[in-house]
Amino acid sequence: MGTHKSRKDQHIDICLTENIDYSKTCHCEGNPFDQWHLDHDALPELNLENLQTKCIFLDIQLSAPLLIGSMTGGTVRAAEINHRLFEAAASCQIGVSLGSQRSLAEGTSCMSDFIPKALSKRPPLVFSNLGAVQLNYGVTLKHIQRIIELTQCDAFIFHLNPLQEAIQPEGNTDFSGLAQKLENIIPQVPVPVFIKEVGAGFSLATLKKLESLSLAGIEIAGQGGTSWARIEGLRSKKGCNRKLGELFASWGQPTIESLIACRKLFPQKLIIASGGIRNGIDIAKSIVLGADMAALALPFLQAASESTEAVIQLIEQLKQELRVAMFVTGAQDILDLKKKKISCHREER
Ligand SMILES: Cc1cc2nc3c(=O)[nH]c(=O)nc-3n(C[C@H](O)[C@H](O)[C@H](O)COP(=O)(O)O)c2cc1C
């Protein structure tokens, strides 16, 4: 069914042409964030012009708690997309994550397939990314150190994607003994380490399995946005995989549920909310629900398929939406926003 490289290009094609965003399917009863309400402040006693969206994440200053989620790399086309994402992230001073660097570890791609060299300015925060399951398929600490050296990343993400691998025709489905491997390897990784899902989120039971790991943080990537079951189903030529993809298209722990559970269990860790976040109000709600930052993937892919300017425009739009949400909740900065009230179906938090 193709190499890692051709698979990454197929993912881009499917994401840009098919309906793989759960929040936009007919099965979804609207954006789950819409069921949550921030208290409106009719007398904010703030000047909108003076509101600050900037934040500190891993001791790095960003213009907003916003990350371009892990997506791609490893092919000429992917490098062009990353070039636009990196240019925009640098220009707007937000974070960006590379897609899986499995092909770099395997030696089937080179750095120029991930980040083009001709960048005049580097984004302030860069994450590298690799599937944790690759630790069961020959990837060692040496590979990870090499990836970190080549990308000069500020932090490293291991992604967990059992559902995607199960539906992917050539998936790597041996997840046995992975928790122990992660526990052994993470303390030796020379930059802060995060764990993320890819769109199916974390249950409380899974989060408890992460308690013994020396993680700097967790990215939720919950159910509610991009559906990897559906993407892999659509990629497959086999009818049975297509059926599997459709059956599991909405599988997983919803983003908000995962986020609340994660913040309860890990009061001190950094948390990135993701999975179906589509506007600045969703970002504001994520922050109030306990996130330190929010990440979007698919909307940035769509923008990057147009131009760097389209990505910049999307970032500025999201920041402006966040600023207005902060204004009408009476929050002058992100720390202040964290203290605001949110409720669901009239149930107070
Ligand atoms: C084209 C594409 C490629 C992706 N590749 C990766 C990847 O290599 N590693 C990873 O951890 N997540 C990957 N993801 C998952 C995203 O980082 C994100 O967790 C998920 O799409 C949910 O966010 P969204 O609903 O905003 O798209 C990818 C997403 C897209 C759209």
Image: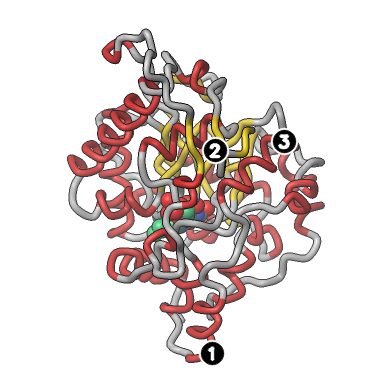
Q: Which mark is residue 272?
A: 2
In which quadrant of the rendered view does residue 123 lie?
top left
Identity of the residue furthest to the bottom in this view: 239
Q: Earlier in the sequence, mark 3 or mark 2?
A: 3
Disc 3 vs disc 2: which is toward the camera? 3
Q: Amino acid type of disc 1?
A: Cys
Dot 3, crowdedness within 10 Å: few (<14), some or many (≥20)?
few
Mark 1–mark 2 Cα distance, whole angstroms, equals 34 Å
Label 3 SS: helix
Dot 1, crowdedness within 10 Å: few (<14), some or many (≥20)?
few
Lateral position of residue 89 relative to residue 204, left or right? left
> In this figure, which colouring scheme has been used for the structure?
secondary structure
Disc 1 vs disc 3: which is toward the camera? 3
Residue at 43%, 40% in the rendered image: 282
Q: Where is 122 relative to 231, above or below? A: above
Label 2 SS: strand
Q: Amino acid type of disc 2?
A: Ile
Dot 2, crowdedness within 10 Å: few (<14), some or many (≥20)?
many
The answer to whether the residue labelled 3 contacts the one labelled 2, judged by CB atoms less than 8 Å apart, is no
Instruction: Name the residue that disc number 3 marks.
Output: 264
Q: Which mark is residue 219?
A: none
Mark 3–mark 2 Cα distance, whole angstroms, equals 14 Å
Q: Is mark 1 within 8 Å of ligand 1?
A: no
In which quadrant of the rendered view does residue 12 lie?
bottom left
Lateral position of residue 63 relative to residue 105, left or right? left
Asked whether residue 310 is in view, the answer is: yes
Residue at 23%, 55% in the rendered image: 305
Mark 1–mark 3 Cα distance, whole angstroms, equals 39 Å
Instruction: Name the residue that disc number 1 marks.
Output: 240
Q: Where is 59 relative to 246, above or below? A: above
